Amino acid sequence: MGGNGYFYRLVKGEAGEVILKLADLILELADEAVGQRGVFKAALAGGNTPAPLYRLLSQKFVHWDNAIFFPTDERYVPLDDPRSNYRMIRENLGEEARIRKINTELTPETACQDFANALSEFGALDFALLGLGEDGHTASLFPGIMCNKCGNTACITEGPDGLIRISMTYEVLRTTRIIAFLVLGEKKEEALKKLLKRDPSIPASRVVGRKQTFVFTDLPL
């Protein structure tokens, strides 16, 4: 499919196969970014789906000293809470990774501003890995729920579970060079169909990479 950011490049297979392919893409993009610009800047999704990918990257990634990782979003819980995206990424990606956490020890407003400042300081990202919820949400950008900005790069919202969340904004995601959605499991089928149709009713359809947008899935579309 097209590479202008307005069409998706679809990568299909069994879950383990697509995770291997996605890892290869991330390693390739890191090599390119470090070789050309000296640093690889990436945003990583939370949740359970990408954990096997991060464990694989913990073994294969080589640019730890020249890479910075950001959570795409975070629940406003302590960083050692099982629901923390930072905790999940850290435990699976490993101790060598430099992860710019969203500091939930601060107030939500201060934590959001701190995150926004960090994103603005580092500039446009090379890569973002995103998930897709059954309701079509991505990061913590939910259908029908405002995400109140603290700058152009971060915002505060509330998830369906009632937890306050801090998220990257549409604006910062759309400046990212390459975006990949990882969509696994039959429960995501309807949401994925909407995404591929660019259905404006779901937040995920509003996110495209500046250069290219991939969809890695085990669904037989």
Image (cartoon, rainbow, N blue to C red):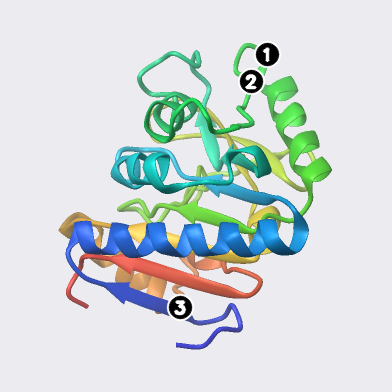
| Residue displayed at 50% across by 13% down | 78
- Label 1 CA crowd tier, 10 Å (few <14, some 14–19, many 20+): few
Residue, disc 3: 8
Residue 100 pos. (x, y %):
64, 31
Assess whether mark 2 and mark 1 are in contact (beta carbons under 8 angstroms): yes
Whole-number angstrom distance, CA of label 1 to CA of label 2: 6 Å
Residue, disc 1: 106
Indicate the quadrant where residue 128 lies. Answer: bottom right
Local secondary structure at mark 3: strand
Q: Which of marks 3 and 2 is nearer the N terminus?
A: 3
Q: Which of 144 and 42 is in front in this view?
A: 42
> Is residue 202 visible in this depiction of the protein?
no
Residue 75 pos. (x, y %):
49, 27
Q: Which amino acid does label 3 sit on?
A: Tyr
| Residue 7 left/right relative to 51 | right
Q: Earlier in the sequence, mark 1 or mark 3?
A: 3
| Residue 172 left/right relative to 196 | right
Residue 126 pos. (x, y %):
65, 59
| Residue displayed at 30% across by 53% down | 134
Indicate the quadrant where residue 37 lies. Answer: bottom right
Residue, disc 2: 103
Whole-number angstrom distance, CA of label 3 to CA of label 2: 33 Å
Indicate the quadrant where residue 34 lies. Answer: bottom right
> Is residue 129 visible in this depiction of the protein?
yes
